[in-house]
Amino acid sequence: MRTIAVFGHRGARGLAPENTIGGFAVARACGVTGVEFDVGLTADNFAVVHHDPRLNAAIARDAAGHYVGADAPLLRGLGFAQLAGYDVGRLRAGSEYAARYPDQVPCDGAAIPSLTAVLAALRELDLLIEVKTAPDRPADTATPAAMATAVIDVLRAADAIEHAVLFAFDWRVLREASAIEPTLRRCCLTEPDTVAQGGLWLDGADLGAFDGKIIQAVAATGAACWAPFHATLEEADVREAQSLGLLVLPWTVNAPEALDRMIGFGVDGIISDWPDRARLAVEHAGCRVAAPGFIAGVGRLIPEIGAPGGVEQKLP
């Protein structure tokens, strides 16, 4: 029976507040392989789990219960203790975000957690960790090197390297992580905008050298996985990526027809805001949801001796 990994996006964003301890518990209850979440750095260099460089105006409330505005502070402008004063457990009524996730059950009092706390809450589950840097807005986040170092330090302390994959749209993060911890598996995130602005996002990769093929450029980084936006993915792309040794993990696959399409294409895993839906779709297709430990079965990465341009090889 074919096995497909199911990952809850930002925990289980369609069901519970994103990137929160409670949301991760909901994802676990859905029977997922693992979860995807985002990491940023505070002013005092705590790695915290939050999607946006700034506090999100549709999510974050201050101690007085007021939602932050467009001038919300940057994560890197607040210490961890200051950040703990914000509540991210309820969507702002009337916001576009709330309209997209009408079934999300609020959890008042939920705080932005540290990466350390999240790893403790997710023991035994597989971890897809997106490092959030913004090469088009470099002042908004810490540097790729600082971000990669902070995340890897926490992963090492939790003995979680084996269960994790480091994700990034900004491929500089992946290069920095490779130098710090070569055995940490890496995944190239792509979407049309970042590919179109490859000079900013793809760490200097020249798509012309790969006949314009993003998949070839991904493989050349030594990444273990490729995570494209699902709507841009075609079956031939899946076959090509897999022939190059890449796992294909499309995001964010939510609608029933999109889930069926990705499963039919033969992807290795699915990242969804509704992991319960994704699990049912996988099982309805006659497949089995991969158990936690799926990531540990993906080949480790080590530098290939003498490889030109730092290209790496995957080892079983």
Image (spheres, rainbow, N blue to C red):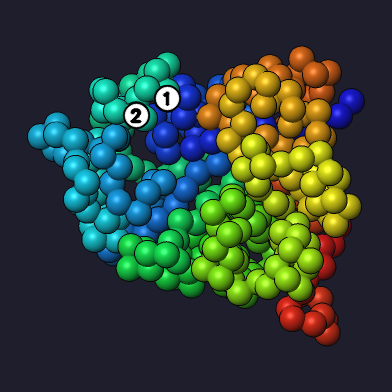
**Crowdedness near tag 2: few (<14), some (14–19) or many (≥20) residues, C-alpha within 10 Å:** few
Q: Residue furthest bottom?
A: 306
> Does residue 292 show up?
no
Identity of the amino acid at label 1?
A: Arg
| Disc 1 element | helix
Front one among 152 and 250: 250
Name above or below for residue 117 compared with residue 105.
below
Identity of the amino acid at label 2?
A: Glu
Name above or below for residue 266 compared with residue 284.
below
Q: Marks 1 and 2: CB-CB under 8 Å?
A: yes
Asked which quadrant contains residue 248, the reply is top right
Residue at 37%, 49% (x, y): give it: 52
Q: Is residue 279 left or right of residue 254?
A: right
Residue 313 in the image, given as x and y percentages of width and height: 82, 68
Q: Is residue 62 left or right of residue 31?
A: left
Query: What residue does disc 2 label?
Result: 96
Residue 100's label in the rendered image is 1
Residue at 29%, 34% (x, y): give it: 58
Residue 183 in the image, given as x and y percentages of width and height: 70, 64
Asked which quadrant contains residue 84, the reply is top left
